Image: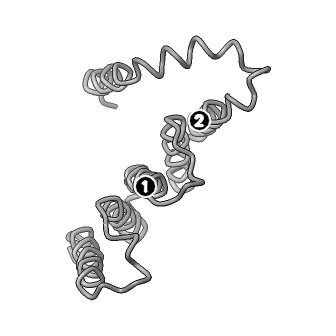
Amino acid sequence: MKKQHSLIAYLCIAIGVYFLFRELKLPFFTDFYSWQTLLMIIGIGVLIHSYTTRTYSNLFAGTLILGIGIHLHGVKHYNFWIDHWGVFPLIIGLALLVRYSKTKKGLLSGIIIVIIGLLLIFSDQLSYYTEWMNPITELVDRFWPLLLILLGFYMLKKPKK
């Protein structure tokens, strides 16, 4: 029972520290006063909660939220950051690999999605080898929201084990 509310506790502590730093206007943290930082804090809180309570199925969600927060923060604040939609499959694949490290589920799908993300990100540099992917990536680039909608409906209708 003691660890039942630990996720809320971790989030309260982290968000409290965030707003304290924001009120103190510490110069080192000025780039971190944004909603992207709140995403990172929530992701870290979910990860800490997952490891301390040994509910490793939440590692995927924590890593996903943290990764998206880091990516969006990087796009906003750093000129060198890769601003490509292929980063999102890469983050999803890495989240699957982090979850695999404790649950031993999702290794193959994680590796495949990481490879797809890397191919999408670097498809411009590999144009000679990936010319066949151009029509596919243009189609996905235009209609990727439909893929999310279809994935959502599939997950709703998928029979539970």
How far from the left and from the top, in percent, is residue 12? 22, 75
**Of the pair 126 and 149, the residue shown nearer to us:** 126
Q: Nearer the viewer, mark 2 or mark 1?
A: 1
Type of residue at label 2?
Gly
Res. 137 image quadrant: top right
Res. 45 image quadrant: bottom left
Please tell me whether residue 60 is drawn above or below residue 115 in the rendered image: below
Q: Quadrant of the C terminus?
A: top left
Asked if disc 2 and disc 1 are in contact, CB closer than 8 Å, the reply is: no
> Residue drawn at (52%, 59%), measured in percent from left and top?
78
**Of the pair 10 and 38, the residue shown nearer to us:** 38
Type of residue at label 1?
Lys
Which residue is the site of mark 2? 117
> Residue drawn at (47%, 52%), measured in percent from left and top?
75
**Spatial CA span between label 2 and label 1:** 21 Å
The mark nearer the N terminus, 2 or 1, is: 1
Please tell me whether residue 25 is drawn above or below residue 87 in the rendered image: below
Q: Quadrant of the N terminus?
A: bottom left
